[in-house]
Image (tube, rainbow, N blue to C red):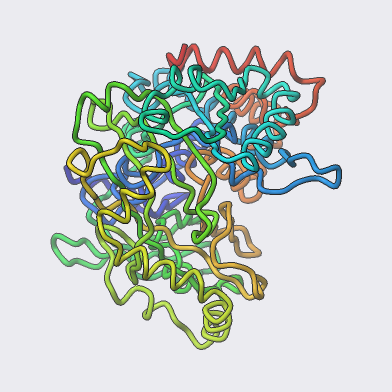
């Protein structure tokens, strides 16, 4: 369904209808109901690119099971779990904000977008077993993860996730589990929040509209938009622009001409999933199971065997498998996106990064040409008895990794979403990757603090933010806040019907 409501000269223009724009739009409108907002989306339906349920892992990334968030050891030899603790805290803000939206009647039926799914880490081989034992010791000592279980008992692991043991040989294995994990459909929550936003006074949503240019003015920005149905070109003026267009963000940031866009490039990575078509197998597995990255793969390509709730039913996916692409968007992208993003100011950076990341480029080409049996061989690491007849390959979303001059000789793939703003704080652009969607509320909260500080300076503004995110100004990682964390966490889970 095409959306076509328009607000002239709004206070805020949001580009893209994914989870970032949805969260920021809803948060700003609750902080200041007098704000006017206009959203533009290139597809006719909302949240069809990176936030769409089939285009991402759907894991509520809270550091519980993702071993790539704890890759390093401390000087004493034990696993460093600090990053996992930090990600948990950031995801907690998402839970609190979505819980608030449900409690306030902004959105309904939370099971449409979030469901309880145990999160498991699974390893094999003695070296990995020792790693997981150390990781569990560090994490379970923190109040975020006190309920995490660890076992090497094969029968217990089979009771958690029977497919892991089906046909497995006698090799040392171990697993951890927390029942408080979640599966999230980020497209569904985006559409719910935007449905509420579109009904508010002074708010418009126009899908099937492509933003084609941005020009800074003394009072903000002139935004040039094309209606893809009629071809009509429109101009709108605003005080603030959020570029939250996923893979389409880089080109728009370059068009803005702000200083931070100079030297910035992007590298697209496609994704694919194996989807189980056997309902008996789907019914046997009720968990998200993450393991270690394979030797040949970059850290972002951590395989996982996932229960998903998509299109109203339980589904089982395995992946991701990477794919070579030059497109920046899954549905509305073009093969010219990558070459078209090359500028005189970023070509040196791109060439240097390419030269120092040849193994990654080779890996992506290899992934794109592998056979179904090659993919089944990877699946057998998690589910040894898997049969090709039970699985099919589908395309998933595309992520565009931002590449900066300051990356130097660093790898192309790294974690986190970067907020790039101009000095006047009238434009912010979001670039990055995992765990972006899961911690999207934390990210847009930083945008509010940086670009709308006046909304938080008053006691009324602080009270409104406290209502939305009760812990927004606390360091929940500290032991002194453990009791308050548990209180707020349980209330959020109750509102979201996760218990």
**In the picture shown, does residue 456 fall above or below 246?**
above
Looking at this rendering, what residue extends furthest in the front direction? 170
Assign the N terminus to one quadrant of the image.
top left
Quadrant housing residue 58? top left
| Residue 456 in view | yes
Q: Residue at x 70, y 29 (%)?
A: 139
Q: In front here: 11 or 339?
A: 339
310 relative to 428 in the view: left or right: left
Q: Nearer the viewer, residue 170 or 329?
A: 170
| Residue 354 percent across, percent down from the top left | 52, 78
Residue ID at (27%, 21%): 283
Q: Is residue 357 left or right of residue 472?
A: left
Q: Give how far across and how far down residue 499 sits, in percent.
A: 47, 11
Asked if residue 262 shows in the view, the reply is: no
Q: Is residue 229 left or right of residue 200?
A: left
Identify the residue at image location x=56%, y=12%.
Answer: 491
Q: Nearer the viewer, residue 4 or 447?
A: 447
The residue located at (41%, 38%) in the rendering is: 382
Place of residue 355 in the rendered image (x, y in percent of width and height, measured from the top left): 55, 82
Front in this rendered view, residue 70 or 105: 70
């Amino acid at each position: 369904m095409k959306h076509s409501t328009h607000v002239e000269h709004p206070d805020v223009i949001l580009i893209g209808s994914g989870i970032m724009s949805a969260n920021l739009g809803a948060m700003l409108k609750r902080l200041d109901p007098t704000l006017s907002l206009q959203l533009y989306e290139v597809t006719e339906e909302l949240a069809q690119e990176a936030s769409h349920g089939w285009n991402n892992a759907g894991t509520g990334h809270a550091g519980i099971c993702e071993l790539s968030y704890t890759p390093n050891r401390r000087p004493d030899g034990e696993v460093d779990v600090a990053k996992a603790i930090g990600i948990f805290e950031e995801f907690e803000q998402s839970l609190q904000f979505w819980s608030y939206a449900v409690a306030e009647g902004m959105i309904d039926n939370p099971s449409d977008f979030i469901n309880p799914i145990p999160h498991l880490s699974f390893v094999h081989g003695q070296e990995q077993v020792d790693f997981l034992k150390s990781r569990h010791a560090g994490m379970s000592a923190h109040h975020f993860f006190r309920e995490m279980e660890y076992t090497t008992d094969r029968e217990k692991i089979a009771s958690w996730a029977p497919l892991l043991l089906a046909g497995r040989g006698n090799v040392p294995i171990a697993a951890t589990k927390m029942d408080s994990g979640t599966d999230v459909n980020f497209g569904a929550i985006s559409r719910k929040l935007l449905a509420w936003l579109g009904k508010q006074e002074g708010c418009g949503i126009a899908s099937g509209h492509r933003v084609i240019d941005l020009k800074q003015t003394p009072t903000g920005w002139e935004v040039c938009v094309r209606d893809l149905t009629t071809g009509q070109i429109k101009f709108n003026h605003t005080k603030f622009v959020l570029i939250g267009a996923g893979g389409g963000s880089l080109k728009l940031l370059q068009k803005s001409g702000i200083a931070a866009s100079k030297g910035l490039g992007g590298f697209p990575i496609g994704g694919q999933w194996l989807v189980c078509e056997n309902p008996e197998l789907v019914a046997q597995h009720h968990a998200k199971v993450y393991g270690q990255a394979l030797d040949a793969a970059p850290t972002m390509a951590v395989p996982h065997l996932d229960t998903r709730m998509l299109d109203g039913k339980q589904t089982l996916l395995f992946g991701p498998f990477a794919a070579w692409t030059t497109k920046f968007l899954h549905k509305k992208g073009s093969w010219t996106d990558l070459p078209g993003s090359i500028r005189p100011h970023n070509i040196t950076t791109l060439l240097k990064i390419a030269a120092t990341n040849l193994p990654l480029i080779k890996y992506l080409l290899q992934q794109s040409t592998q056979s179904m049996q090659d993919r089944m061989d990877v699946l057998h690491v998690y589910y040894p008895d898997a049969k090709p007849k039970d699985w099919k390959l589908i395309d998933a979303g595309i992520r565009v990794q931002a590449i900066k001059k300051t990356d130097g000789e660093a790898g192309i793939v790294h974690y986190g979403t970067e907020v790039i703003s101009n000095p006047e704080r009238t434009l912010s652009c979001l670039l990055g990757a995992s765990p972006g969607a899961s911690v999207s509320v934390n990210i847009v909260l930083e945008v509010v603090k940086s670009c709308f500080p006046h909304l938080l300076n008053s006691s009324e503004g602080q009270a409104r933010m406290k209502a939305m995110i009760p812990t927004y100004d606390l360091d929940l990682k500290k032991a002194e806040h453990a009791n308050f964390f548990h209180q707020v966490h349980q209330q959020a889970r109750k509102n979201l019907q996760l218990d």
